[in-house]
């Protein structure tokens, strides 16, 4: 990292983005000091990721993002989430779901009849093995709680289910995992508590209910919208970060209209390193150099915003 920063200085770069760092460090850490000097002594704008170690606790912010004059950028959760949708008979709007990891992806077409054995207050729904054929060819609607998702999915699969629809027992959204002793070979998805209640009511009604897999995208409010993402580092809490990060940017699950062909070229095989931007001698001519291929993160969009501040900037996102 120090060598990359020295190269940026030697090439007279105006802006330096670094989507990399060392967690649980301090402003006196070598890369933080070097990045800070680029700002103080050479007038370079330095933007760096603050880190992805938030789940490990407080004070997880990393260098060089913790440099005093460095713009350390965290990720924050979008105010809305986008999910694949399914349709259910008797319910007007599509219902969004999160696919479970360690299960096959849900299809985008096809219809299954829904069946449930529990209630909206069950505490161990789907936790006990069921006779073979209980859910034969059906979609099992199962409430969260009492045992792991893997156990619920395995029991439903063993009872002949063609799919499992899990629903939350509290507010918010989660992405479950069904990794366990029994490999899961049927689609398993998770829906919200409110949608689960609606599905349960329709499924247990005299008319019953069927679900249809679709290609629809459903958006819904996020209970963590506007807060630092759980994985993102900070030197404070999710609601009240202290000295780091400097800003939050690039909501997680953000969609972009940038064409897939817009990429900074790289000859390196490293995952993430430094991206430097600078002006060549000719007016209004910008170019980019990368010491590694760009990687997803909150700091590149922040650095891109800075590009527009000094004056001349690339005529298009796919400029040189």
Image (cartoon, rainbow, N blue to C red):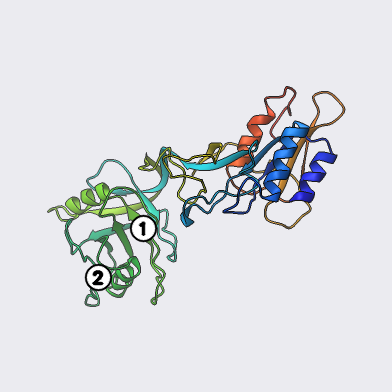
Question: Which residue is rendered at x = 20% and y = 63% of the image?
Answer: 123
Residue 47 located left or right of residue 227? right
Residue 250 coordinates in the image, percent (x, y): 54, 39
1 or 2: tag closer to the N-terminus: 2
Question: Which residue is rendered at x = 40% and y = 73% of the image?
Answer: 180
Residue 139 coordinates in the image, percent (x, y): 29, 62
Task: Tell me the SS state at disc 2.
Answer: loop
Q: Which residue is mark 1?
A: 189
Residue 314 located left or right of residue 295? right
Q: CA–CA distance between discs 1 and 2?
A: 17 Å
Residue 27 position (above or below residue 319): below
Task: Determine the image quadrant of residue 264.
Answer: top right
Q: Is residue 257 visible?
A: yes
Foreground tag (1 vs 2):
2
Question: Which residue is rendered at x = 24% and y = 66% of the image?
Answer: 146
Task: Tell me the SS state at disc 1.
Answer: strand
């Amino acid at each position: 990292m120090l060598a990359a920063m020295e190269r940026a200085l030697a090439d007279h770069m105006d802006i330096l983005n670094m989507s990399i760092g060392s967690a649980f460090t301090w402003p006196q850490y070598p890369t933080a000091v070097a990045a800070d000097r680029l700002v103080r002594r050479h007038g370079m704008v330095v933007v760096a990721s603050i880190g992805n170690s938030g789940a490990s606790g407080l004070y997880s912010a990393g260098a060089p993002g913790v440099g005093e004059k460095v713009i350390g950028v965290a990720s924050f959760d979008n105010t809305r989430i986008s999910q694949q949708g399914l349709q259910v008979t008797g319910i007007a709007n599509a219902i969004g779901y999160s696919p479970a990891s360690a299960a096959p992806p849900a299809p985008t077409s096809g219809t299954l009849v829904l069946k449930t054995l529990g209630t909206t207050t069950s505490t161990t729904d789907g936790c006990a093995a069921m006779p073979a054929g209980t859910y034969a060819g059906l979609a099992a609607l199962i409430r969260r709680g009492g045992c792991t998702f893997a156990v619920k999915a395995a029991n439903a699969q063993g009872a002949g289910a063609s799919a499992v629809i899990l629903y939350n027992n509290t507010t918010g959204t989660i992405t479950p995992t069904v990794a366990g002793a029994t490999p899961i070979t049927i689609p398993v998805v998770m829906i919200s508590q409110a949608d689960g209640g609606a599905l349960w009511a329709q499924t247990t009604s005299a008319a019953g209910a069927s679900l249809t897999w679709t290609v629809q995208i459903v958006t819904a409010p996020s209970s963590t919208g506007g807060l630092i993402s759980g994985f993102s580092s900070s030197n404070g809490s999710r609601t009240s970060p202290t000295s780091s990060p400097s800003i939050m940017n690039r909501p997680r699950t953000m969609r972009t209209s940038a064409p897939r062909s817009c990429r900074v070229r790289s000859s390196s095989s490293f995952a993430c390193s430094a991206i430097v931007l600078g002006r060549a001698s000719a007016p209004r001519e910008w170019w980019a150099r990368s010491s590694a291929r760009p990687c997803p993160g909150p700091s590149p969009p922040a650095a891109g915003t800075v590009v527009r501040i000094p004056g001349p900037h690339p005529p298009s996102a796919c400029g040189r």
